[in-house]
């Protein structure tokens, strides 16, 4: 099965799973247009921002479900990673959320430990204060 047919099948399944009110339909059409104009045959990357209640989570869940995880034996391929980010997330915070969403607990623990040490060093009475 070619990537183009695969994407079309996934798009059809995605459309069937969602109840389309005007806002959700508009969001999905925008995503579909991005796929067509960029020549995407597989999922790439996307950020969605918008006011509360406009359907971002509904669209993201439906899109994520259209690209299921693939068990490759030694690893699991994740074509779509869905994670919710607070509006004030830094680049490091984004990395932490992505690692957590992929189940990479060792890396997230290491980043948390680095954050804890940095916070400890920043206190004036800390022996590690710089």
Image: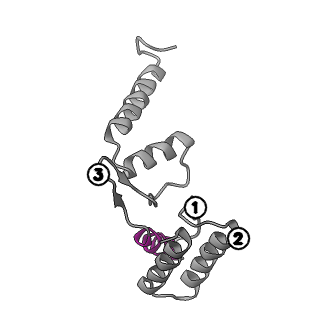
Q: Is residue 31 visible?
A: yes
- Mark 1 surroundings within 10 Å by alpha-carbon count, few (fewer than 14), some (14 through 19), many (20 or more): few
Mark 3 vs mark 1, foreground winner is 3
Residue 1 painted magenta: no
Residue at image mark 2: 37
Mark 2 vs 1, N-terminal side: 2
**Residue 8 image point, x, y percent:** 53, 78
Residue, far front:
1
Mark 3 vs 2, N-terminal side: 2
Residue, far left:
73
**Residue 6 image point, x, y percent:** 49, 73
Above or below, 108 against 46 in this view is: above
Callout 1: SS: loop
Residue 56 painted magenta: yes
Left or right, 4 with reference to 97: right
**Residue 38 image point, x, y percent:** 68, 66
Callout 2: SS: helix
Above or below, 80 against 16 in this view is: above
Task: Give the label on residue 56, or none.
Answer: none
Task: Give the label on residue 46, or none.
Answer: 1
Q: How far separated are the C-alphas under marks 2 and 1?
A: 14 Å
In the foreground, 110 or 42: 42
Image mark count = 3
Residue at image mark 3: 73
Callout 3: SS: loop
Left or right, 105 with reference to 84: left
Q: Main secondary structure of the magenta part?
A: helix
- Mark 2 surroundings within 10 Å by alpha-carbon count, few (fewer than 14), some (14 through 19), many (20 or more): few
Q: Which residues are magenta?
A: 55-66
Q: Residue at x 61, y 82 (%)?
A: 26
Tell me if label 3 and label 2 are in contact, CB under 8 Å. no
């Amino acid at each position: 099965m070619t990537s183009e047919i695969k994407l079309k099948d996934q798009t059809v399944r995605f459309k069937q799973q969602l109840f389309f009110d005007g806002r959700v339909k508009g969001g999905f059409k925008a995503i579909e247009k991005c796929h067509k104009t960029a020549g995407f045959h597989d999922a790439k990357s996307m950020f969605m921002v918008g006011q509360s209640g406009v359907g971002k989570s509904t669209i993201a869940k439906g899109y994520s479900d259209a690209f299921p995880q693939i068990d490759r034996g030694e690893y699991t391929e994740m074509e779509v990673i869905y994670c919710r980010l607070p509006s004030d997330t830094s680049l490091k915070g984004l990395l932490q959320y992505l690692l957590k969403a992929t189940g990479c607990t060792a890396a997230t623990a290491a980043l948390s430990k680095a954050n804890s040490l940095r916070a400890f060093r920043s206190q004036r009475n800390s022996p590690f204060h710089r």
